[in-house]
Amino acid sequence: MTLNFWIRNRSVILYGSSLAVLLFLMKWLEWRFIIIDHALELYAGALAIIFTLLGIWLAIKLTRPKTNTIIVEKEVFVKSDEFVLDDKELTRVGLSKRELEVLQLMAQGLSNHQIAEHLFVSLNTIKTHSSKVFEKLEVQRRTQAVDKAKKLCLIP
């Protein structure tokens, strides 16, 4: 049956395949002439497309705003008109009454000499109290001590 099909349609198959071969040959020759005759234009067009795409990509990269989101978490202390001493923090830190007085006078901005005159004690006693306050509050400077004491509600 297959052989009969080929014999019966031989002329049609031969005619169709010769047309396909001729069409393939013509397209191949046309392609060669296009490539040979217009090679410079094709290369220039390909380069233009590549550089256009590169320029668009580069412009998008360079003009994009560089934003960095930084999240800062801070404790917020609401200052009220009425100060309440936090006794629990005072006992936890372990400040004596005299050390608390020295700390309050430090917060007022008085020097060691002025604090000594105000409390009627010697300058060395004030220096000792100050160093004990720094040690108990775990700070290095007067400003740090005052700031930490305000956060712990030890001074107004």
Image (cartoon, grey):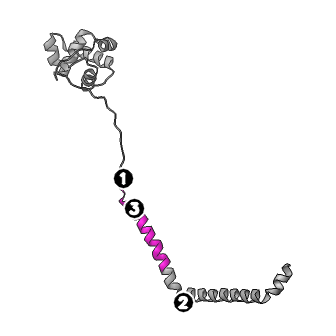
**Residue 37: image tag:** 2
Please report whichever mark, 2 or 3, sits nearer to the chain's N-terminal start. 2
- Disc 1, SS: loop
**What residue is shown at x 41% (from left), y 67% (from top)?**
56
From the viewer's perspective, is 111 left or right of 74? left
Q: Position of residue 122 (x, y in %)?
A: 18, 12
From the viewer's perspective, is 37 left or right of 12? left
The type of residue carrying mark 1 is: Lys
Please report whichever mark, 3 or 1, sits nearer to the chain's N-terminal start. 3
Please give the residue where the numbered disc 3 appears in the rendered image: 60
Query: Which picture quadrant has residue 4?
Result: bottom right
- Picture quarter with the N terminus: bottom right
Label 2 to label 1: alpha-carbon separation: 48 Å
The answer to whether any part of residue 124 appears in the image is no
Label 2 to label 3: alpha-carbon separation: 37 Å
Q: Position of residue 132 (x, y in %)?
A: 29, 15
Label 3 to label 1: alpha-carbon separation: 12 Å
Read off the magenta span: 45-66
